[in-house]
């Protein structure tokens, strides 16, 4: 994710040069929210989860073998010679080192899981980066921040949120988002009154009064009083 956030920052720096002579516009996006909407990102996470589960099971098998060596040594230590003890201890230490090495290889910093995550996420991040760049150019934005990045954003005004525009560039935008609001005065319509059943009794045991109906008198013919 840090490399991807660096790409977003690079877009901001490249576009900021063009807006020095004029008032700069800026916006922000939520890259994690965007990628979570992308099917290819979900597929990549499923593949990573499968690999992680496979490697974790292999580690558990090695751990059980190591635990067995420990138990056997403790149970038989009293009858072992010093040479035999030394041999057993070396065997245990070797297994512990092998387990540690394998765990670091798969899950450690820049291990297999780390490299695989970079490999699978890079195409997704590139697509988001391209979409962000297009939105920045269309909206004449000098700077675009990443809300999910390392930059701490204590307050974000929704008016500067361009996340949905990026989703639209990716073909994932919602039709009811980023649309112009209704023009003209807003009319308020009173909700209709619920008719009252005259046979319904309230908690007090007395029938509720029926709703009054307003009767409109017919207009008198012209010339008559």
Image: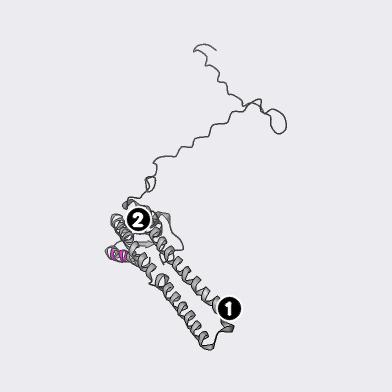
Q: Which residue is mark 1?
A: 75
Does residue 70 appear in this view?
yes
Residue 7 in picture, x, y percent from top left: 32, 65
The crowding category of the residue bearing disc 1, from other C-alpha atoms within 10 Å (few below 14, some 14 to 19, many at least 20), is: few
Marks 1 and 2, how far apart at CA: 53 Å
Residue 158 within the segment the image draws in magenta:
no
Asked if 191 appears above or below 165 in the picture, the reply is above
Pick out the residue farthest to the bottom: 82
Q: Is residue 108 left or right of residue 16?
A: right
In the picture, the disc for residue 180 is: none
Which residues, given as a range, are shown in magenta?
10-14
* Rendered residue at 38%/71% (across/down): 111
Which quadrant holds the C terminus? top right
Q: Is residue 158 left or right of residue 127?
A: right
The crowding category of the residue bearing disc 2, from other C-alpha atoms within 10 Å (few below 14, some 14 to 19, many at least 20), is: some
Work out whether mark 1 precedes mark 2 in sequence or the reverse, and give the earlier one.
Answer: 2
Does residue 30 appear in this view?
no
In the picture, the disc for residue 40 is: 2
Residue 104 in picture, x, y percent from top left: 42, 73
Under tag 1, what secondary structure? Answer: helix
Pick out the residue farthest to the top: 224
* Rendered residue at 54%/87% (across/down): 81
């Amino acid at each position: 994710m840090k490399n991807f956030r660096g790409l977003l920052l690079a877009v901001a720096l490249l576009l900021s040069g063009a807006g020095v002579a004029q008032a700069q516009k800026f916006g922000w996006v939520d890259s994690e929210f965007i990628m979570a909407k992308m099917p290819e990102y979900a597929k990549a996470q499923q593949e990573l989860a499968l690999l992680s589960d496979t490697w974790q099971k292999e580690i558990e098998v090695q751990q059980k073998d190591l635990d067995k060596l420990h138990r056997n040594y403790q149970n038989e230590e009293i009858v072992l010679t010093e040479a035999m003890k030394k041999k057993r201890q070396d065997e245990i230490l070797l297994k512990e080192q092998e387990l540690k090495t394998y765990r670091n290889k798969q899950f450690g910093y820049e291990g297999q899981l780390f490299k695989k995550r970079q490999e699978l996420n890079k195409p997704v991040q590139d697509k988001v980066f391209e979409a962000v760049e297009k939105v920045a150019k269309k909206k004449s934005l000098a700077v675009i921040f990443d809300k999910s990045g390392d930059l701490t954003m204590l307050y974000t005004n929704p008016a500067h949120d361009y996340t949905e525009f990026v989703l639209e560039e990716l073909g994932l935008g919602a039709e009811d988002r980023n649309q112009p609001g209704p023009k003209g005065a807003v009319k308020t319509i009173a909700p209709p009154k619920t008719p009252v059943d005259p046979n319904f009794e309230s908690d007090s045991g007395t029938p509720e009064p029926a709703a009054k109906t307003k009767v409109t008198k017919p207009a008198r013919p012209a010339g008559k009083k």
